């Protein structure tokens, strides 16, 4: 009898732990549309730390290795159990189920930026195949028609433009560059334009932002928006001063490795 009581008590604790773990996956701060977690997989809890801070966009680098999409920044950091499915797709699926069809309950469409690090065409084809297994979660383009889902996936890095554009159904868009402004590529193919801050601006976050560069930044943001595309910069100073300029200019995604810092900054600016 005593053993039965102990067994039931242990079982109750285990069930409670599992239920609480799933419940926690549905919790997060209120969503911050401009917050983008650069190299998100380097945080202690990939994806989950960003979601807990209200981020609506995360970035994962992938390599195709022996038929698996592995998440890492470099080849020497590859680990066989750190797959795209395990770190991102399965947790996102559980959250969307818990939140009534959104990553953040009543929040905006979530962005998953996927940086392809090797064999662009083969990696993308495998990525598209894998995402097709989560077709109820991701936006897709089929026969030229865009169908919105809870998540917009966008690929960067080694981008096989022609193969991507010709594939249907397609579960990703492509991350363009500033040199792609003026392109006739449809919005659903190139929904985002990103570029290296250091290639276009001299300001490194110290002293005052030169007015000429502030004007240039705002013109680039306007140009992106005129084409119905979003805009992001990487390699920008990861400081409140930079966040302030990007936010004021209307940049759609603000790149950071400092999740709590950008969280606090954006919430303080909205008060």
Image (cartoon, grey):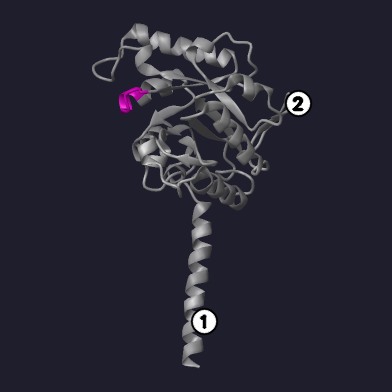
> What secondary structure is the magenta-colored segment mainly?
loop
- Is residue 188 visible to us here? no
- Left or right, 76 with respect to 97, comes to left
Q: Secondary structure at mark 1?
A: helix
Is residue 237 shown in magenta?
yes
Q: Position of residue 91 (x, y in %)?
A: 53, 49
- Left or right, 226 with respect to 115, comes to right
Residue at far bottom of view: 1
Q: Residue at x 28, y 20 (%)?
A: 205
Vertical side of 21 occupied by 200: above or below: above
Q: Quadrant of the C terminus?
A: top left
Q: Choose mark 2 or mark 1, whichever is in front.
A: 2
Q: Which residues are magenta?
A: 235-242
Residue where numbered disc 1 is placed: 8
Q: Position of residue 136 (x, y in %)?
A: 68, 43
Residue at far front of view: 66
Q: Residues within 10 Å of mark 1 (few under 14, many from 20)?
A: few
Q: CA distance from mark 2 to mark 1?
A: 55 Å
Q: Position of residue 76 (x, y in %)?
A: 35, 38
Q: Residue at x 65, y 22 (%)?
A: 165
Q: Position of residue 164 (x, y in %)?
A: 63, 25
Residue where numbered disc 2 is placed: 143
């Amino acid at each position: 009898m005593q053993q039965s009581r102990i067994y039931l008590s242990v079982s109750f604790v285990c069930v409670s732990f599992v239920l609480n773990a799933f419940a926690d996956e549905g919790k997060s701060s209120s969503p911050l549309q401009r917050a983008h977690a650069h190299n998100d997989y380097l945080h202690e809890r990939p994806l989950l730390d960003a979601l807990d801070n209200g981020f609506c966009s995360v970035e994962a680098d992938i390599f195709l290795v022996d038929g698996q999409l592995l998440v890492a920044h470099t080849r020497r950091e590859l680990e066989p159990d750190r797959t795209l499915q395990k770190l991102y797709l399965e947790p996102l699926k559980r959250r969307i189920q818990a939140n009534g069809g959104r990553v953040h309950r009543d929040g905006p469409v979530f962005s998953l930026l996927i940086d392809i690090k090797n064999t662009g065409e083969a990696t993308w084809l495998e990525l598209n195949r894998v995402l097709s297994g989560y077709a109820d979660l991701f936006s897709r383009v089929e026969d030229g028609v865009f169908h919105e889902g809870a998540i917009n996936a966008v690929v960067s890095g080694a981008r096989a433009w022609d193969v991507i554009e010709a594939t249907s159904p397609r579960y990703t868009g492509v991350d363009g560059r500033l040199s792609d402004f003026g392109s006739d590529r449809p919005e659903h193919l190139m929904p985002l334009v990103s570029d290296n801050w250091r290639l276009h601006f001299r300001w490194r976050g110290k002293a005052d932002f030169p007015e000429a560069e502030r004007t240039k930044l705002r013109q680039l943001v306007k140009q992106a928006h005129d084409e119905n595309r979003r805009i992001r910069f990487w390699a920008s100073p990861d400081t409140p001063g930079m966040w302030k300029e990007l936010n004021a200019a209307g940049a759609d995604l603000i790149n950071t490795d400092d999740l709590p810092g950008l969280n606090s900054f954006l919430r303080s600016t909205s008060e």
